[in-house]
Amino acid sequence: MAFLTADYSKNQENSFEAIPTGNYEVLINKAQEQATKNGAESLQLDLLIRNDLDKVPALAGTNAKYHNRHVFMDNWKRKQTNQYDTDSFQYILDAAKVPEGTVLNSVDDFIKAITGKPVQAYIKNEDNTYNGKTEKVNRVAPWNISETNYPEVNHKFKDSKKSTDNPFDSKNDISIDDSEIPF
């Protein structure tokens, strides 16, 4: 059996250019803290444009056209306080339908509460000038994250092993009574 047969019929152009401004249905695919070389810290959200809504007519120019694209949203710590603006995180929690009154004791708790949740994001395409070079980038402000119009998620990840469910999460534990153990 051959290892590989050259077949270019499914090849398509993949562009990393900024996507057009608009409302996109996304999953909060991942969230993680990062730091620049200069020590500036941020909590970065990886917003993944959902591919399960391609046939929704209202999303023909957004999700259907740009599904599976990632847009990164940085939430920077304030220089004066070296703390995150937790007021802006409230928009994300509300959009992710985290119940009001939920206590989050750490950034990790916040990450766990929002990861895998469907939300709608207003993604802007704007110019960014850095070191004299201007390029188009995507930006998402926390107040531009809102509740999804499509809460049922059937997104198919490119890597079939990828899932937002954590198999080691306590909610997936199997409960066995001592009387069921044979020894």
Image (cartoon, helix red, strand yellow):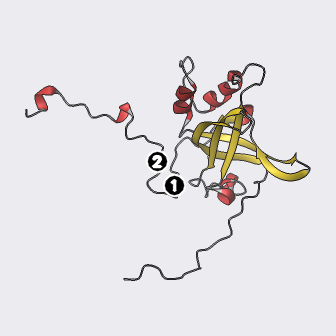
Residue 91 vs residue 35, the one in the foreground: 35
Q: Amino acid at mark 1?
A: Phe
Name the residue: 59% across, 79% down.
9
**In the rendered view, would you say 28 is above or below 66?**
above
Picture quadrant where residue 30 is located: top right
User: CB of mark 2 within 8 Å of CB of mark 1?
Assistant: yes
> Which quadrant of the figure contains the N terminus?
bottom left
Q: Which residue is mark 1?
A: 157
Instruction: Check disc 2: other Cα within 10 Å, few if <14, some if 14-19, many if 20+.
Output: few
> Which quadrant of the figure contains the C terminus?
top left
Measured as percent of width and height from the top left, residue 108 is found at 54, 29
Residue 128 vs residue 63, the one in the foreground: 128
Q: Which residue is mark 2?
A: 163
Instruction: Check disc 1: other Cα within 10 Å, few if <14, some if 14-19, many if 20+.
Output: some
**In the rendered view, would you say 109 is above or below 54?**
above
Measured as percent of width and height from the top left, residue 138 is found at 77, 47
Q: Secondary structure at mark 2?
A: loop
Q: Residue furthest right?
A: 132
Measured as percent of width and height from the top left, residue 120 is found at 66, 41
How many angstroms separate mark 2 from mark 1 (CA)?
7 Å
| Number of the label disc, if any, that sits on residue 131 | none
Q: Amino acid at mark 2?
A: Ser
Name the residue: 63% across, 44% down.
46
Q: Mark 2 or mark 1, which has the lower sequence index?
A: 1
